[in-house]
Image: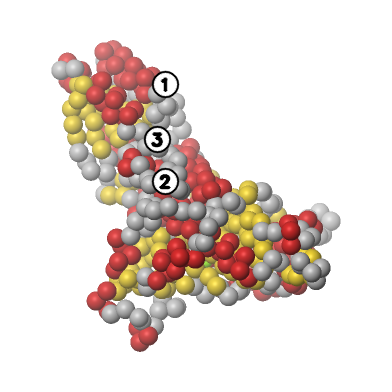
Amino acid sequence: MRLSEYFLPVLRENPSEAQIASHRLMLRAGMIRQSSAGIYSWLRLGLRVLKKVEAIVREEQNRAGAQEILMPTIQPAELWRESGRYDDYGKEMLRIRDRHDREMLYGPTNEEQVTEIARAFVKSYRDLHKLLFHIQWKFRDEVRPRFGVMRGREFLMKDAYSLDIDAAGAKHAYNKMFVAYLRTFARLGLKAIPMRADTGPIGGDLSHEFIILADTGESAVFCDRRWLETDILAGEIDYAGDLEPFYKRWTALYAATDEQHDPASCPIPASDLVSARGIEVGHIFYFGDKYSRPMGAVVAGPDGEPVPIEMGSYGIGVSRLVGALIEANHDAAGIIWPESVAPFRVGLINLRATDPRSRQAADEIYGKLSAAGVEVLYDDRDESPGAKFATMDLIGLPEQVVVGPRGLAAGTVEMKNRRTGQRQDMSIESAFDRLVTCSPSPHPAAGKKRAKSAQP
Ligand code: ATP
Ligand code: MG
């Protein structure tokens, strides 16, 4: 993509409304535009990242055997009356009336909707187990929307729902999502720690929040120091097999949110305990028949007896993750994208757009890299070198290639790694080789040891 043609409305000044780095940088890098409090348009660069995050979330859901559907954003109030949540949900729910005066709502979550689908189509224990998911916008009229997309009112969520005949089946589904979540966040280059959590308005018996550590996180959290050195993606995973040992292993290390942590009964010594702030990026629940029973989602069991479906729900904040990724990956100059979600892998800068030789060389590198399938954003504009460097650092593409008259006279271009800051002059061929041969593989297999280059 040529920057001269691309829609990238970067801001020079720091927007005054942004309190945290990710919000500030998303506005400055032209990723989002606020529409009203907590509601945003996603511009080109922001949308590219959102789609990449979504794709990784989807791949890991598929790998775990979840099947994608798409449920609506607008739901009938009726369903929520059946579960009893229409009144409980309070002011966070955006309530709407259609032209026939029917009560509708913009879904804050989809347990009722999926239970209605289950009751319509799942009639026998033989139809179970099922794991359904969708990636859909939600609306919650938060009291204090803030921090940009981190606490929005309209936000993108992946929510999955498991349907099983008994508690053992439901726990296996819970374990599948538990594993898929650890893998998803690890592939995004984030360390998300599962913490036993309150089940809140979703209700139920078993629940974990997945929390990444960041100074600007909204909740206080505590965990075993050893969490910081774990490698989730190492080792084999067989979703059809017994996942309980994996679950036990990753819940054995102490981790708790503020509400669950009690210093008096904490099982590890204070010297091993890390006290930090965290951002919730995912939340899983097992709630049994909380919805299936009142809504009549009942199947015929093996002996013909009616059995309410055992259910769980599993959410990931897809749009929140974009902000969380920036919180975990930035410096004073701007964003530093992990390879796995970078909007483009390479930023190509032509230092002197008016110099025919530089332009020809940069055009050629751009053409060759694009043809080799490398995603390149090519700054071909007639701007000062300072402005070009600042923009590239701000938008945080992992690799920069700088083409200018002086280097070309010596037969070289400059390569800069955004994360390490390391610069190196090299021949065009070597630069090309490095960018093409070091392309990260986007599909590390669950069952295989991860290739080095796949690590974000
Ligand atoms: P929080 O405690 O942060 O308000 P929640 O517990 O209400 O979140 P869940 O119902 O568990 O949220 O939703 C699943 C996921 O959706 C959360 O883990 C989070 O990543 C994301 N999410 C929830 N609320 C918002 C929001 N207002 N803006 C962006 N993402 C959100
Ligand atoms: Mg939650």
**Number of numbered discs overlaid on the protein picture:** 3
Disc 1 marks a residue whose amino acid type is Ala
Q: Is residue 155 above or below residue 454?
A: below
Q: Is residue 127 visible?
A: yes
Q: Are marks 3 and 2 in contact (CB under 8 Å)?
A: no
Residue 397 percent location from the top left of the image? 34, 38
Q: CA distance from mark 3 to mark 1?
A: 14 Å
Mark 2 and mark 1: Cα distance apart in space: 30 Å
Instruction: Give residue 441's position: percent from left, percent from top.
Output: 40, 37
Kindly tell me whether mark 3's CB lies below 8 Å from ligand 1: no
Tell me which numbered mark, 3 or 2, is placed earlier along the sequence: 3
**Which of label 3 and label 2 is nearer to you?**
2
Mark number, residue 448: 2
Q: Which mark is residue 371?
A: 1
Kindly identify the residue that appears in the image at 43 percent across and 39 percent down: 442
Give the number of the mark in front: 3 or 1.
1
Mark 2: amino acid: Lys
Tell me: 163 left or right of 426. Answer: right
Q: Earlier in the sequence, mark 3 or mark 1?
A: 3
Q: Nearer the viewer, mark 2 or mark 1?
A: 2
- C-beta proximity under 8 Å, tags 3 and 1: no
Q: Is residue 190 above or below residue 302?
A: above
Residue 336 located left or right of residue 26 = left
Q: Look at the numbered disc 1 and give the secondary structure of its residue.
A: helix
- How far across and down, in percent of the image, does residue 76 sit? 76, 60
Residue that label 3 marks: 344
